[in-house]
């Protein structure tokens, strides 16, 4: 399996990276994508990817869009020149929390899509309560990518799939309370458009028994996401694990050495 999204730069993981990665490998996670959310964390994500033979994204999250300045493209391009960087993002729109003004979110999102198009990079996308604007802006550019941590409705899912996007599913699908709608939508995601991710240290799968004392998610728990999804598809776990790994390499244009 590949964890297609982990916030390894989060302070909850400080001084624990070697152990976390070792536990992930022991649990069948062969690699992971470390997410950058602003310039500082993007630089840290790249450093972690270099030091631990992982992959990284570089970008500015909509929450942090207000921090972007006129050097954004130059800084991200510099990071993206490293072979460990495989996507621009996490970028997108978040109208749920509105930590950055919406006009600034849209502007910074467009700037990153334009850069991804220029560099021929996939994008790692975030969207909350903003699917209409998100879709309209995405249609302005020719980019491939993944809608990370999808939790939207059937209409949004269809629209994202129609754009050719991959869909990232997290431990949200393991939540018997708020994950019900997502569980119903899983079978309508083509298996060749699916990625699995933990979004660690967030969204720990509620199906873990017994629950870890730390309440902190980590890549080693990716199998719980895979298992729940496999049940919803009525497929063996290893089929979902194998296909989502293949999808990761396809989307990010990487060589898959089996």
Image (cartoon, rainbow, N blue to C red):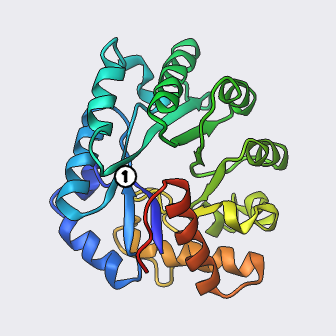
Q: How many marks?
A: 1
* Quadrant including the C terminus: bottom left
Rendered position, 165 above or below 119? below
- Would you identify the image quadrant in which residue 234 lies? bottom right
Q: Is residue 207 visible?
A: no
Rendered position, 76 above or below 247? above
- Would you identify the image quadrant in which residue 54 lies? bottom left
Q: Nearer the viewer, residue 134 or 207?
A: 134
Q: What residue is rendered at 45% in x and 69% in y?
A: 2
Rendered position, 170 above or below 237? above
Where residue 98 appears, x then y in whole percent? 55, 24
Q: What residue is rendered at 48% in x and 75% in y?
A: 1
Q: Residues within 10 Å of mark 1 (few under 14, many from 20)?
A: many
Q: What residue is rendered at 25% in x and 47% in y?
A: 46
Rendered position, 249 above or below 59? below
Where residue 129 appears, x then y in whole percent? 68, 34
- Mark 1 secondary-structure assignment: loop
Where residue 83 appears, x then y in whole percent? 30, 49
Q: Is residue 241 left or right of residue 257?
A: right
Q: Is residue 220 left or right of residue 179?
A: left
Find disc 1 in the rendering and name its residue.
7
Q: Is residue 60 visible?
A: yes
Q: Nearer the viewer, residue 245 or 218?
A: 245
Q: What residue is rendered at 73% in x and 43% in y?
A: 160
Where residue 139 appears, x then y in whole percent? 71, 28
Q: Is residue 20 left or right of residue 58?
A: left
């Amino acid at each position: 399996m590949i964890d297609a999204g982990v916030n390894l730069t989060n302070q909850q993981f400080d001084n624990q990276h070697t152990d976390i990665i070792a536990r992930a490998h022991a649990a069948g996670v062969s690699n992971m994508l470390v997410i950058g959310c602003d310039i500082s964390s993007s630089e840290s994500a790249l450093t972690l990817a270099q030091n631990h033979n992982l992959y990284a994204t570089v970008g500015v999250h909509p929450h942090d869009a207000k921090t972007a300045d006129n050097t954004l493209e130059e800084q991200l391009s510099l990071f993206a020149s490293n072979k460990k960087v495989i996507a621009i993002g996490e970028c997108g729109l978040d109208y749920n929390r509105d930590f950055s003004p919406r006009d600034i979110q849209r502007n910074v999102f467009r700037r990153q899509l334009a850069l991804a198009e220029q560099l021929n990079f996939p994008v790692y996308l975030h969207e909350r309560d903003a699917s209409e604007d998100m879709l309209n802006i995405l249609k302005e550019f020719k980019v491939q990518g993944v809608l990370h941590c999808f939790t939207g409705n059937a209409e949004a899912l269809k629209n994202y799939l129609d754009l050719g996007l991959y869909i990232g599913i997290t431990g949200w699908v393991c939540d018997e309370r708020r994950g019900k709608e997502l569980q119903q939508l899983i079978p309508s995601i083509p298996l060749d458009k699916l990625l699995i991710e933990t979004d660690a240290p967030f969204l720990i799968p509620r199906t873990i028994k017994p629950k870890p004392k730390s309440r902190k998610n980590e890549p080693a728990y990716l199998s719980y996401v895979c298992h729940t999804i496999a049940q919803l598809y009525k497929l063996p776990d290893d089929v979902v694990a194998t296909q989502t790994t293949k999808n990761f390499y396809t989307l990010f244009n990487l060589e898959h050495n089996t």
